[in-house]
Image: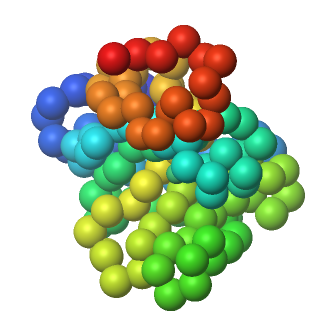
Amino acid sequence: MSETVPVTGSGTEVRSGGCLCGKVRFTVTGPVDDPHICACKDCSTRSGAPFQWWVGFPMSGLEWTGAEPTWFDTHPGKTARGFCPDCGTHIAARDYGDSTIIGILAPALDHHDTDPALVPTNLNRLPEAAPWLAQVD
Ligand SMILES: [Zn+2]
Ligand SMILES: [Zn+2]
C-alpha cells in the first residue's frame, strides 16, 4: 500500500506530485476543490497549450518536499504561478491575500490519470481558446 494513493472522500487523503526533472516535489493533504479546466489567455500562453487543468487543495495541507517552485507574478499583488526553474514544469498558482487554497496543475500530481476526484467539473472558457476542440456541454 502506498500512502500516495488517494482515498476519495475521506478529507484526509494525501497526494504527491512534482515536476518532470524531480527538483520540485510536494504533497497535498485534504479534499479536492473545484477541479476545472481553464483556457484563459494566461493559462494558454504560459503553458503553450490550449488550456490547463487545475485543482484546488487546502493551503494548510501543502508541503514542499523538494525544492519550492519559482514564483512568477502573473498579476502583481494578486496572483502568482509556480514552476520548476530547471525543467519548466507548471506546478501551482496562488492568490495573494488568500491563504486557504493552493491551485495545483493536476498533471503535476503523480496519479492524476487514475484519480477520479480530479476529473474536471467545469470547463472554463474552453471555446474561446480552442474552437476546434470537441466541446462538452
Ligand atoms: Zn523540474
Ligand atoms: Zn486560466
Q: Answer yes or no: is residue 23 visible.
A: no
> Which quadrant is the N terminus positioned in?
top left
Q: Residue at x 80, y 63 (%)?
A: 85
Relative to the observer, which residue lies in front, 51 or 26? 51
Q: In which quarter of the view is residue 97 placed?
A: bottom left
Residue 99 percent across, percent down from the top left: 31, 75
Residue 70 lies in quadrant: bottom right
As drawn, 82 above or below 50: below
The residue sitting at 46% across, 68% down in the picture is 94
For the view shown, which residue lies furthest in the left direction? 10
| Furthest-right residue in this view | 86
Residue at (54%, 12%) from the top-left corner?
A: 134
Name above or below for residue 12 compared with residue 62. Answer: above
Q: Quadrant of the C terminus?
A: top left
Q: How many marks?
A: 0
- The answer to whether any part of residue 46 appears in the image is yes
Horizontal and vertical percent position of residue 16 = 48, 41
Name the residue rendered at 57%, 77% in the picture. 75
